[in-house]
């Protein structure tokens, strides 16, 4: 499918969609599943074959029926409500925007969002997403394949501060934190506290403590929330832009900005001429 033209009108639709997503997420308390949708659409990227990634393909039944995507049809249907109002926006942009908004409305950091992703109907084969039952080597295999780092792995794992596991979707049950609708660093605090009644720690969570390189980030983020927010925002942005070159569809926007700038200069020059003429006439009368 063709790249969207990110012109002034497209950006206006993005802003309207952002407002609609804020309202929808707040009303339905669906931030966790919206974030999961964004991650799972993006997390199929393969840096070597340049396939998968944040291209909206998760809307295909073939892909949302993958075991790792159990329950995401709910989020897809929520997004469809917004897509109906703003049909010009690509699904790829919409799903990533939903993830960004989900983090922001729950108190998390502002994640920079650049639109312009194109949609795809080609779904990757199952097995590209992380398996919660496995450890550090598996996490590295999955995230390195995307082109991400150890720091990205730990920072993005902190997104488990939102939501809970559902047995009918993953086989696991329970929240990771005491306030699963608040985005903060409590995932790391609870991880270091050890297993607590009523809270969940998956094998992939515990792997962050067992691996020395991962653990140093866990300890930092548990101690300094600002460091977590800074690194999370950067890692989320990287994930949301895998295989995407921001600005590739924004030629019209650049032209629009140039025209606006030229127009502003023209107005300023005209105003200056008028003012100078006025003072010239005043001086003539005073002589």
Image (cartoon, rainbow, N blue to C red):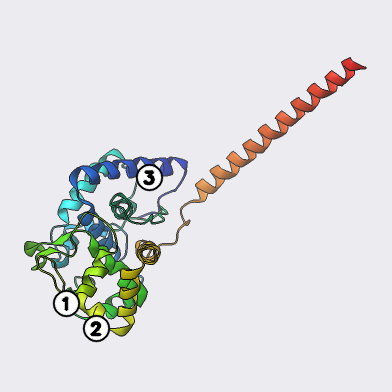
How far apart are the alpha carbons under marks 3 and 2? 42 Å
Labelled disc at residue 88: none
Q: Position of residue 225 (x, y in %)?
A: 35, 64
* Image quarter of the N terminus: bottom left
Q: Is residue 202 left or right of residue 168?
A: right
- In the image, residue 117 sits, relative to residue 264, either above or below, namely below
* C-alpha span from label 3 to label 1: 38 Å
Mark nearest the camera among 3 and 2 is 2
Instruction: Residue lying at the far top in this picture: please name it.
Output: 285
**Viewer-side label of 3, 1:** 1
On the image, which quarter does residue 114 sit in? bottom left
Residue 202's image quarter?
bottom left
Q: Using the image as rendered, state which of residue 203 and residue 226 is in the foreground.
A: 226
Residue drawn at x 15%, y 65% is 66
Regarding residue 150, the answer to whether it shows in the image is: yes
Disc 1 crowd, CA 10 A, few/some/many (<14, 14-19, 20+)? some
Q: At numbered mark 3, what does the secondary structure look like: helix, strand or loop?
A: helix
Which one is earlier in the sequence, the residue at label 2 or at label 1?
Answer: 1
Quadrant occupied by the C terminus? top right
Residue wearing tag 1: 203
Q: Secondary structure at mark 1?
A: helix
Location of mark 2 (residue): 210
How far across and how far down the image is residue 284, in percent? 89, 18
> How far across and how far down the image is residue 176, in percent?
18, 65
The residue nearer to you, when weighing 282 against 16, is 282
Q: Seen from this angle, which residue lies furthest right?
A: 287
């Amino acid at each position: 499918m063709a790249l969207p033209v990110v012109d002034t009108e497209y950006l206006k639709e993005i802003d309207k969609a952002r407002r609609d997503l804020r309202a929808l997420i707040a009303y339905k308390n669906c931030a966790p599943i919206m974030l999961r949708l964004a991650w799972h659409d993006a997390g199929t990227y393969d840096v070597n074959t340049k396939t998968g990634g944040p291209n909206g393909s998760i809307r295909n039944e073939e892909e949302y029926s993958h075991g790792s995507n159990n329950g995401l049809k709910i989020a897809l249907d929520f997004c469809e409500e917004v897509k109906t109002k703003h049909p010009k926006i690509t699904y790829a942009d919409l799903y990533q925007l939903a993830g960004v908004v989900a983090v922001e409305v729950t108190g998390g950091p502002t994640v920079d969002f650049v639109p312009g992703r194109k949609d795809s109907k080609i779904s990757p084969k199952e097995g590209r997403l992380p398996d919660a039952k496995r450890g550090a080597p598996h996490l590295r295999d999955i995230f390195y394949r995307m082109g991400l780092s150890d720091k990205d792995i730990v920072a993005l794992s902190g997104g488990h501060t939102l939501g809970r596991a559902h047995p009918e979707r993953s086989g696991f049950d329970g929240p990771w934190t005491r306030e699963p609708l608040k985005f903060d660093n409590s995932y790391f605090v609870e991880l270091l506290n050890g297993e607590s009644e009523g809270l969940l720690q998956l094998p992939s969570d515990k792997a962050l403590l067992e691996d020395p390189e991962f653990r140093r980030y866990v300890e930092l983020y548990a101690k300094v929330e600002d460091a977590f927010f800074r690194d999370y925002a950067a890692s989320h942005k990287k994930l949301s832009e895998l295989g995407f070159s921001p600005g590739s569809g924004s030629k019209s926007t650049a032209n629009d900005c140039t025209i606006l700038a030229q127009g502003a200069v023209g107005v300023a020059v005209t105003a200056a001429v008028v003012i100078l003429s006025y003072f010239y006439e005043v001086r003539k009368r005073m002589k």
